[in-house]
Amino acid sequence: MSAHVLYGDSYLVPRELAQLKADTGTADLLEGNSHRLQGSQTNLPELLSICNALPFMDARRLVVVEGLLSTLEGRSGRGRRRGRGSQPTSGTLGSWEGLAEAVAAMPETTLLVFLDGPLTDSNPLLQALTPVTQVLALKPPAGEALARWIKASAEDKGASISPAAIGSLTDLVGGDLWSLDRELEKLSLYASGQRIEEADVADLVHQAREANVFAAVDAMMDGRPEVALRLLTQLRRDGRDASYIIAMVERQLRLLALARDSLDQGVPQRELGARLGGASQFVVRKTLAQARRHSWQDITWRYQRLLEADLAIKQGRLEPDLALELLAADQAAHTHR
């Protein structure tokens, strides 16, 4: 079959396209035989005109259409869930009525590929194209599958990685494959042929610094000013300026407020990551634990003190290090009031 639908994760989809092009010999076509169209900026007659043309001095013609199916996402169903095998209702395809029939009649020399992000099974174009294309849903791996992906990705970069390092990496970064790929690239170079260990992840991965921020906020809220100050000082020694530290603490307090609101509304923990902006499991666990220990009044007070410290630094009334020291002491002292 010369037509494909590849949709799902933004990291996996382009890599699957690259593999498909390698498998079909369409990676190095003449410019006139390789076309890339934006679904929102094309129409059926234009697409058919390109797809039905025979290739020039090449055996194949490649036509890639990006984002077309998502333009019709949510158009069908009207509150009902539809199965993948059911046909879209009349009119739901709009100007794309007849696309499936046209795809089935295209010359074998044309390789047509639709690329898209996550789609629902009720998408009318997905339903219409399923019988006449090879459909591949590319969902990001999770759990053990994600651990295997990290291990394989490290090996592809010429490195090996310990199970503990894999666990630490997923805790800190989450399931974002783009971020994981970047961190594994850095870790592979850093390891220089040695196995990547948990200590390497703690030393090198950017998100690992979030752990110090969480620990500092924990120390403030638990009445441990010495620990909070030590952690904030370490962040300063790492080259982070006061505005960054203030911003990171502010971010954590904002996430804390969202988590507290989610708890009050009875939102399941499995949905909390999405409500916190796609945060990693490390962020979700720490934020949820903090939210269970603190009231709205407490969170609001701490947020106000943080804003006052930020303003004092920006207005030049306090030196950054002194402002952070006073902030840590003030926040920790509030625990015992």
Image (spheres, rainbow, N blue to C red):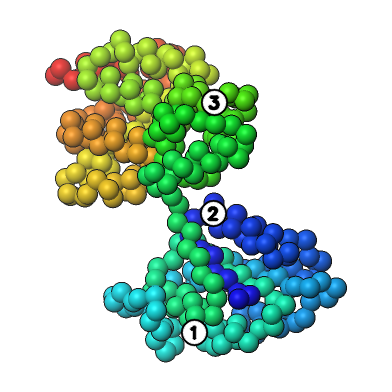
In terms of image quadrants, where is residue 86?
A: bottom left
Mark 3 against mark 1, which lies toward the viewer? 3
Q: Nearer the viewer, residue 223 or 172?
A: 172
The residue at the point 45 percent across, 52 percent down is: 140
Quadrant in which the N terminus appears: bottom right
Q: CA distance from mark 3 to mark 2?
A: 26 Å
Secondary structure at numbered mark 1: helix
Mark 3 against mark 2, which lies toward the viewer? 3
The count of marks equals 3
Q: Amino acid at mark 1?
A: Gly
Instruction: Judge the density around disc 3: few (<14), some (14-19), many (≥20) Cα neighbours within 10 Å.
Output: some
Horizontal and vertical percent position of residue 57: 85, 73
Looking at the image, tell me whether mark 3 or mark 1 is earlier in sequence order.
1
| For residue 223, side relative to residue 36 (left or right) | left
Q: CA distance from mark 3 to mark 1?
A: 55 Å
Mark 1 against mark 2, which lies toward the viewer? 2
Q: Amino acid at mark 3?
A: Arg
Depicted 298 relative to depicted 326: above or below: below
The residue at the point 38 percent across, 26 percent down is: 211
Q: Does residue 323 appear in the picture of this structure?
A: no
Q: Which residue is mark 2?
A: 12
Q: CA distance from mark 1 to mark 2?
A: 29 Å
Q: Nearer the viewer, residue 322 or 11?
A: 11
Q: Indicate which disc residue 70 carries.
A: none
Q: Nearer the viewer, residue 324 or 142?
A: 142
Q: Which residue is mark 1?
A: 94
Q: Which residue is mark 3?
A: 195
